[in-house]
Amino acid sequence: MATQDIPVIRVLMALYPGMDTLDFTGPLEVLSTAQHNINDASTKAFKFTFVADEEHIVSAQGASFRAHVGYKEVYARLKEFDILIIPGGGAETILKNKSEPLGLIKAYADLQKKHPEKERTLFSICTGSLLLAQQGILAGLSATTHPDYFTKFEKINSEVTQRDLAERADIVEERYVVNNLRFDLGENPDENPYIRRKSDAGRRPSNARKGSMSWKESNTRRESNARRAALRLGGLRVITSGGVTAGLDASLYLVSIMVSEESANEVARILQHTWQKGIVVDGIDI
């Protein structure tokens, strides 16, 4: 398949006052560095849109960032985006004020349930997972956050379970946790390195389909659409990560499955970052 035939992966990043700078810039650095062809700078894999309530927002560290669009426009364009990224940092203020991006998170998940024919990913970094929990996204899934916020995370999940009469989230301490994976379970799930509840470090290479070819096919194959529709949240891939550097690791995972393993390893080399891998739960090739 020619590189020019591979569509750009569109990423929506939600900005809000008090977010952690690296929760935003870390994934941005990783994904913006990724290329379909590691030797061709014209093959950038991801394209970004930043959304916020105001044109300029200030992070917890005092850095100012400019949004491309407001929420009114982004709600109208929500179907365009393949990935929604929610940074952490000021999550408790968002919860207290019941402000954006809470509504955006719910709308994106609802969109996937209504239109499962497209593969979509919801990805939170650090305490961004508290916002996903508040919106009931994590019910019945496995998830993580920064260890300092586990008690708060558990409390929110418990309250939401009672509010929605839903299953509890399985909270685990990992670098990142992925739900609704695309890869094939295979004949022996215990031997498939992409179906796991423990770290994948040191596991053998997988023969499962992955990368940009599988991502594109996943949005067109009828059997993919049917399987995705039967999964939780319409097959929405939900990724939660631990603290700021864990967001780098989860971003590298996204590169590995949506572009290629080679691209992810090249990004890690360029960033001089040692990729520490997390866990993936209940994989299926959709």
Image (tube, helix red, strand yellow):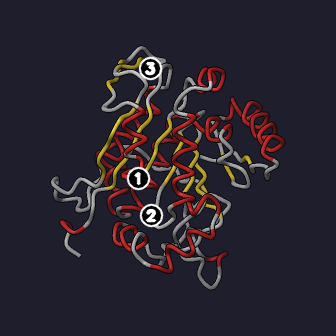
Q: Earlier in the sequence, mark 1 or mark 3?
A: 3
Q: How dense is the environment of label 2, judged by Cα within 10 Å: few (below 14), some, or many (20 and up)?
A: many
Camera-side mark, 2 or 1: 1
Q: Nearer the viewer, residue 9 or 268?
A: 9
Q: Which of the 4 image quadrants contains residue 99?
A: top right
Residue 61: percent from the left, percent from the top?
45, 17
Residue 187: percent from the left, percent from the top?
62, 85
Task: Identify residue type, mark 3.
Answer: Ser
**Residue placed under numbered mark 1 in the picture:** 79
User: At 65% across and 77% down in the image, what residue appears?
Assistant: 189
Q: Which of the 4 image quadrants contains residue 219?
A: bottom left
**Relative vertical location of residue 196 with respect to residue 188 in this rendering, above or below:** above
| Cα–Cα gap, marks 2 and 1 | 9 Å
**Residue placed under numbered mark 3 in the picture:** 59
Q: Earlier in the sequence, mark 2 or mark 1?
A: 1
| Cα–Cα gap, marks 1 and 3 | 28 Å
Q: How dense is the environment of label 1, judged by Cα within 10 Å: few (below 14), some, or many (20 and up)?
A: some
**Quadrant occupied by the N terminus:** bottom left
Residue 275: percent from the left, percent from the top?
46, 50
- The residue furthest top is 62
**Residue placed under numbered mark 2 in the picture:** 118
User: At 52% across and 68% down in the image, what residue appears?
Assistant: 182
